[in-house]
Image: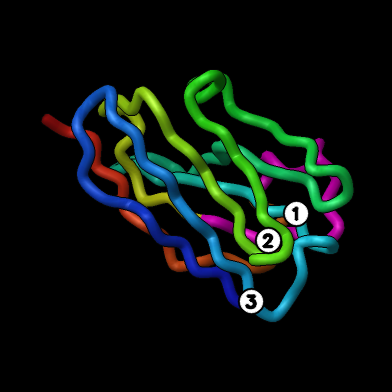
Amino acid sequence: VQLQASGGGLVQPGGSLRLSCLASGFTLDYYSIGWFRQAPGKEREGVSGISSSDGSTYYIDSVKGRFTISRDKPKNMVYLQMNSLNSEDTAVYYCAAAPHAILSTLRSERAYDHWGQGTLVTVSS
């Protein structure tokens, strides 16, 4: 089981990025996927997640209306579209996989047993 996150980079405030998470060795039919981020000097926090069972999603309040999580099952890909980025979004972003996890558990790191390597998002002018 492997996860590979990509798509990070340097973007100006107000800009957009799309992060991708490629899952290999397992299917999204059985694994929920979450996006987490860790800003410098801060603890890692859950940002968004998508449930394996029905594709239901959650977002933390600070990204609601700006970020969108989606998945492409045939490609085994999960995306995080990030719009209206600001400096507080600067962080290393990780995707993680949680087997058969229901939506209510996806906010907790404890639900996840596989993690990708992280991709750096820097929002700066």
Which mark's residue is nearer the viewer, 3 or 1? 3
Give the distance between the C-alpha atoms of the residues marked 2 and 1, in whole angstroms: 6 Å
Amino acid type assigned to the residue bearing label 1 in the image: Ser
Q: Are marks 2 and 1 in contact (CB under 8 Å)?
A: yes
Q: Which residues are magenta?
A: 95-108
Which three-letter amino acid code belongs to the residue tagged 2?
Ala
Q: For label 1, count other residues whose C-alpha is less than 10 Å away and answer few (under 14), some (14-19) or many (20+).
A: many
Residue 1 vs residue 82: left or right?
Answer: right
Q: Secondary structure at mark 1?
A: strand
| SS at circle 2 | strand
Q: Which residue is mark 3?
A: 24
Determine which of the numbered discs, if any, sits on residue 97 in the image: 2
- Of the numbered discs 3 and 1, the one sitting upstream in the chain is 3
For numbered disc 3, what is the local secondary structure? strand
> Nearer the viewer's eye, disc 3 or disc 2?
3
At x 61%, y 60%, the residue is 77
Q: Residue 49, how many percent across, how many down?
A: 66, 42
Mark 3 is surrounded, within 10 Å at the Cα level, by few (under 14), some (14 to 19) or many (20 or more) other residues, namely some
